[in-house]
């Protein structure tokens, strides 16, 4: 019985917990995409930042259904891609370089209680998709169009 | 120093006068955007009379340009072909095929513009398809729609229809290009015999006395990129490989690789078997005639 409990506890600890991608397509025009994302954080600023970064995670590694970017911009294996281009992604997320590709980021809800003392907020974000793709090409994260 | 120069030259195989310090730029596919035509329709008149089709083509090319990719201009090629009297038939569908062939394009994108009038508004639908010419493999297919508007400005509607799908279309196409980079480019190899030839596919050749068709397949097994090839059929007088994958880059030197270089390898193989061959290469098809 003790062994079973220990094994259960070990299994639950070793399982990776991935953040949910609460990013939904709103509209898109030539070279831009607008989405609504839910961000979670300890305060308003962190929650907005989390929402913004989720948008890029979805565009890079999942693709956004209903938009022009249905396929992931980079690939589905985010762990491998982030490890391969560590410096780029460190700058992009930790260095908050992602903000240079955001045309607007407008909170549309009040900060609400979430879990474990964290708060959540909904944000409408408009991304400059063409500039983002060109940046990925320039830094060799993805190939340019063609072979 | 001389030794170093020789080794650099042998690795990159480039003339010092024209080389670029060993840098190799990948040869890109040539892509041409053409209008859809029904059988018997004159391509040039269709384009000259229908500005919606011209707008759609210009907008699609703009999509390629925004990705930093230059396409082959269909109208310029058509004009050059007519000026040089290249066409041999009055059949316009044949002319389309001939323009595609003479353009040297690897991929063509066909756009069909359908203008619809209705009481609840007018709209334009667009069917976009991309094919790899050598294999006929489909690279991308999308249908674009302008949506219905109370307007007679079909030019604007055509433009909207293209905008609705071109990015997605190019993304799917790029996915297929990635597959080609990883798995190789598809070429066709057509092996036949000169009427005077003493050989047939069932002839026993080589030191091990295997049938010629078996020798060819064993060679293909070793030389097709990632062992990826498909035999369409073999008879005593012909053998067709309808899909042989070759790499985009020479795996030893890193230089660009093409069907001509693969044809050279085939030539060496037949010469090793003590056979003379004729070799013709048209676009991505290698025709071998055993003499």
Image (tube, helix red, strand yellow):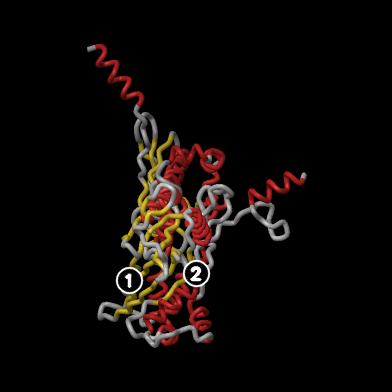
Residues B136 and B46: in front is B136
How far separated are the C-alphas under marks 2 and 1? 21 Å
Residue A126 seen in the current view: no
Q: Quadrant of the image for the C terminus of chain B?
A: bottom left
- Give the chain of mark 1: B
Please name which of the two marks, 2 or 1, marks the residue nearer to the observer: 2
Residue, far left: A1
Packing grade of label 2 (10 A; few <14, some 14-19, many >=20) is some
Q: Quadrant of the N terminus of chain B?
A: top right
Tell which circle, 2 or 1, labels the residue nearer the N-terminal end. 2
Q: Is residue A99 left or right of residue B112?
A: right
Name the chain letter of the residue that bears numbered label 2: B
Q: Position of residue A21 (x, y in %)?
A: 36, 43
Query: What is the residue that sits farthest to the top in this orientation?
Result: A2
Up/down of A4 relative to B255, above or below: above
Residue A5 sits above or below residue B16 on the image: above
The residue depicted at 73 percent of the width and 59 percent of the height is B17
Specify the farthest residue to the right: B1
Q: Is residue A76 above or below residue B45?
A: above
| Residue A23 x, y percent position in the rendering | 37, 48
| Image position of A79 with respect to B274: above or below | above
Say whether residue B99 is visible.
yes
Q: Is residue B70 left or right of residue A68?
A: right
Question: Looking at the picture, how far across and down is residue A131, in whole percent?
Answer: 53, 56
Residue, disc 2: B62
Residue at 46%, 59% in the rendered image = A32
Q: Which residue is mark 1?
A: B147
**Residue at left offset 38%, top offset 71%:** B161
């Amino acid at each position: 019985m003790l062994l079973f409990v220990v094994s259960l506890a070990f299994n639950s600890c070793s399982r990776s917990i991935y953040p949910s991608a609460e990013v939904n397509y709103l509209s898109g025009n030539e070279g831009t995409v607008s989405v609504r994302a839910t961000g979670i954080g300890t305060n308003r600023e962190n929650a907005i930042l989390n929402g913004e970064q989720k948008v890029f995670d979805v565009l890079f590694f999942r693709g956004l259904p209903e938009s022009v970017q249905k396929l992931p911009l980079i690939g589905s294996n985010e762990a491998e891609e982030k490890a391969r281009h560590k410096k780029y992604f460190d700058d992009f997320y930790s260095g908050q370089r992602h903000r240079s590709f955001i045309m607007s980021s407008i909170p549309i809800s009040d900060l609400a209680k979430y879990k474990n003392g964290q708060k959540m907020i909904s944000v409408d974000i408009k991304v400059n998709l063409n500039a983002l793709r060109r940046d990925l090409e320039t830094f060799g994260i993805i190939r340019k169009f063609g072979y | 120093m001389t030794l170093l120069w020789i080794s650099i030259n042998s690795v990159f195989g480039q003339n010092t006068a024209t080389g670029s310090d060993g840098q190799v730029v990948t040869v890109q596919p040539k892509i041409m955007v053409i209008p859809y035509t029904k059988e018997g329709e004159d391509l040039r008149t269709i384009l000259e009379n229908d500005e919606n089709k011209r707008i759609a083509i210009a907008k699609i090319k703009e999509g390629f340009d925004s990705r930093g990719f230059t396409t082959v201009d269909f109208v310029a090629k058509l004009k050059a072909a007519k000026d040089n009297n290249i066409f041999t038939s009055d059949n316009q569908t044949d002319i389309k095929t001939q323009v595609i062939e003479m353009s040297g394009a690897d991929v063509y994108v066909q756009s069909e513009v359908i203008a619809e009038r209705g009481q609840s508004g007018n709209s334009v639908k667009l069917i976009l398809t991309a094919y790899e010419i050598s294999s006929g493999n489909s690279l991308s297919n999308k249908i674009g729609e302008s949506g219905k508007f109370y307007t007679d400005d079909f030019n604007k509607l055509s433009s909207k229809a293209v905008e609705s799908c071109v990015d997605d279309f190019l993304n799917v196409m790029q996915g297929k290009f990635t597959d080609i980079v990883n798995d190789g480019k598809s070429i066709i190899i057509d092996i036949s015999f000169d009427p005077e030839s003493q050989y047939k596919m069932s002839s026993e050749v080589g030191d091990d006395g295997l049938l010629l068709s078996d020798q060819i397949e064993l060679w293909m097994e070793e030389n097709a990129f990632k062992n990826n090839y498909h035999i369409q059929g073999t008879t005593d007088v012909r053998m067709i490989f309808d899909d042989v994958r070759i790499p985009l880059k020479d795996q030893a030197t890193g230089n660009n690789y093409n069907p001509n270089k693969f044809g050279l390898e085939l030539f060496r193989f037949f010469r090793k078997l003590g056979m003379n061959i004729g070799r013709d290469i048209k676009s991505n098809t290698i025709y071998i005639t055993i003499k």
